[in-house]
């Protein structure tokens, strides 16, 4: 059993594992191990809408509603329910008060049901929490890419894509 946490993405904390493979004297060769991510990933991207009058200067960004800490059995990939997390502050990943084009990612503990929210401050105005209703579960090895867009004076969730990673 290994402990996994929902936290700002870093390669050092991206736990990968391979499920058990049976080996015996008649089948003693392992050609490859199929590595799998222990976490799900949540990536936040941003685009300024054509009607947004501001500079799109971010001073805060956080994700809430994720499980904080759980354990994973790397023999079969099962995750044990864990504790609730507080807000995960992604502000330290902002670059020159902006979200990089590739987005800002957090590792997320997989869970069967989810109620993710995003909050941020742009040009001194607080937005959120925005409910990401398109994310109903967080699956190991999937990246949930949430694109935020300013439209006039509002911030909206423009799109949610789910991809393997």
Image: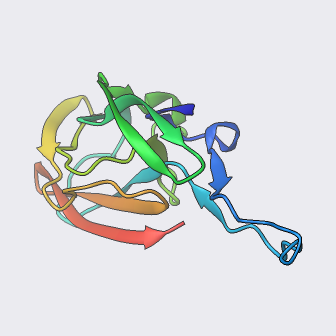
- Quadrant into which the N terminus falls: top right
Quarter holding residue 51: bottom left
**Direction front: furthest residue:** 25
In the picture provided, is 5 more to the left or to the right than 1?
Answer: left
Q: In this view, does 57 lie above or below 150?
A: above
Is residue 78 or residue 148 the one in the foreground? 78
Quarter holding residue 121: top left
User: Residue drawn at (43%, 71%), measured in percent from left and top?
Assistant: 163
Specify how the rendered protein is coloured: rainbow
> Residue 9: x and y, percent?
55, 41
In the picture provided, is 46 more to the left or to the right than 20?
Answer: left
Q: Is residue 60 above or below residue 144?
A: above
- Quadrant into which the C terminus falls: bottom right
User: Residue drawn at (20%, 47%), measured in percent from left and top?
Assistant: 114
Q: Is residue 38 above or below residue 5?
A: below
In the picture provided, is 9 more to the left or to the right than 30?
Answer: left
Is residue 54 or residue 12 the one in the foreground? 12
* Residue 115 visible in the picture: yes
> Residue 15: x and y, percent?
63, 44
> Residue 60: x and y, percent?
35, 29
In the picture provided, is 18 more to the left or to the right than 124?
Answer: right
């Amino acid at each position: 059993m290994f402990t996994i946490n929902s936290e700002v993405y870093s390669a050092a904390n991206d736990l990968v594992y391979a499920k058990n493979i049976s080996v015996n004297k008649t089948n003693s060769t392992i050609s490859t191990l199929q590595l799998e991510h222990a976490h799900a990933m949540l990536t936040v991207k941003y685009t300024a809408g054509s009607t947004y009058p501001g500079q799109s200067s971010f001073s805060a960004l956080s994700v809430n509603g994720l499980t904080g800490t759980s354990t994973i059995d790397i023999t079969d990939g099962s995750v044990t329910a864990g504790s609730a997390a507080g807000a995960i502050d992604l502000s330290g990943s902002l670059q020159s008060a902006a979200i990089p084009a590739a987005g800002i990612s957090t590792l997320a503990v997989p869970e069967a049901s989810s109620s993710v929210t995003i909050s941020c401050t742009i040009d001194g105005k607080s937005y959120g929490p925005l409910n990401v209703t398109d994310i109903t579960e967080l699956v190991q090895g999937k990246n949930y890419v949430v694109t935020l867009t300013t439209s006039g004076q509002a911030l909206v969730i423009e799109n949610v894509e789910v991809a393997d990673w």
